[in-house]
Image: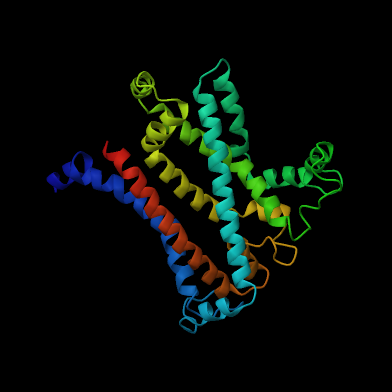
Amino acid sequence: MKRLLSSTIDGRGFDIALVALPLAFLLALSGIPLLYNVLMSFQEVDMFSLGTLWRPFVGLRNYRELFAQPETWPILANTAVFVTASIAGQFVIGFGLALFFWTNFPGASWLRGLFLVSWVMPGLVVGAIWNWILSGDFGVLNFLLRESGIISGNIFWRSDPNYSLWAVILANIWLGTSFNMILLSVGLSSIPGDLYEAAELDGANAWQRFWTITLPMMRSSIGAIIALGLIFTLQQFDLFAAITSGGPNNSSNVTQYWAWDMSFRQYDFAKGATISVIMIVFVMIASVVYVRSTRHEVRG
């Protein structure tokens, strides 16, 4: 008993306890709801059976009915466009800003900090701000586009089916660019300066140094950022709720908002759980990519 107590206080048992407690907490708050959601996607669930665990088992019927609905494939296509455009926009702009601040000019530190304002703001607040920016009648974006001669009349970003999805994409790019910038800045700072000096002495220009040194050395950081971007973008709900509510006519609807709408507006909890399970698969793929991208850094 004394040996067991000693091991628990200072030894291998203490290490196991340190790991076991967070894992138990994570299992209780995330694992059990996740398993419950997966189980619900294979059951018939309505308002009267929601409070019980044992409900009629229907197998893959919810999945078959979901993919048979006419709005499913357009919404999946919207999700693919939203995720791809958001990740690409955040990465390109974030990488450009990271390279810009990498020059370390006077005032770069506090100016870089200002970009973090968008990341720390709640999604609903960002959505409200972009509601004003994207307003068809008095929005700042329309004013700037008209004054620059790009458009001749107002664009109703939130209510026009051709622009509603891109309205949310613009807001999401603005929201996540600073996060990409910070992580890419960390990756850039880890590259030894001697490599650039040697390449410059060998006659390599700026583009050649970027292509042969910066990108290869940033490969693990880029993989991690893209994987995290996929996870965060698939979780984005607030902007859709604040800007377009998935409309008009599902033109800006995506799977994460559709799952909420199916469950808490249409009260089809089984279909909402089915959509969530499909999203979980993509998040797990992104998680594997993230872990593999950071494995080399952890070992180093």
Asked if residue 269 is positioned above or below residue 126 in the image, the reply reads below
Judging depth in this view, the residue of 145 and 207 nearest the camera is: 207
The residue drawn where x is 80% and y is 36% is 148
For residue 186, which quarter of the picture? top left
Relative side of 38 to 131, left or right: left
Judging depth in this view, the residue of 71 and 54 nearest the camera is: 71
x, y percent for residue 214: 41, 32
- Whether residue 50 appears in this view of the structure is no
Q: Quadrant of the C terminus?
A: top left
Looking at the image, which residue sits at the far front? 203
Relative side of 7 to 97, left or right: left
The residue drawn where x is 31% and y is 44% is 295
- Whether residue 182 appears in this view of the structure is yes
x, y percent for residue 5: 18, 45
Judging depth in this view, the residue of 259 and 215 nearest the camera is: 215
Relative side of 198 to 99, left or right: left
Asked if residue 198 is positioned above or below residue 126 in the image, the reply reads above
Color encoding of the figure? rainbow
The residue drawn where x is 73% and y is 62% is 247
For residue 126, which quarter of the picture? top right
x, y percent for residue 10: 20, 38
- How many numbered circles are shown? 0
The residue drawn where x is 60% and y is 24% is 111
x, y percent for residue 243: 72, 52
Asked if residue 86 is positioned above or below residue 114 in the image, the reply reads below
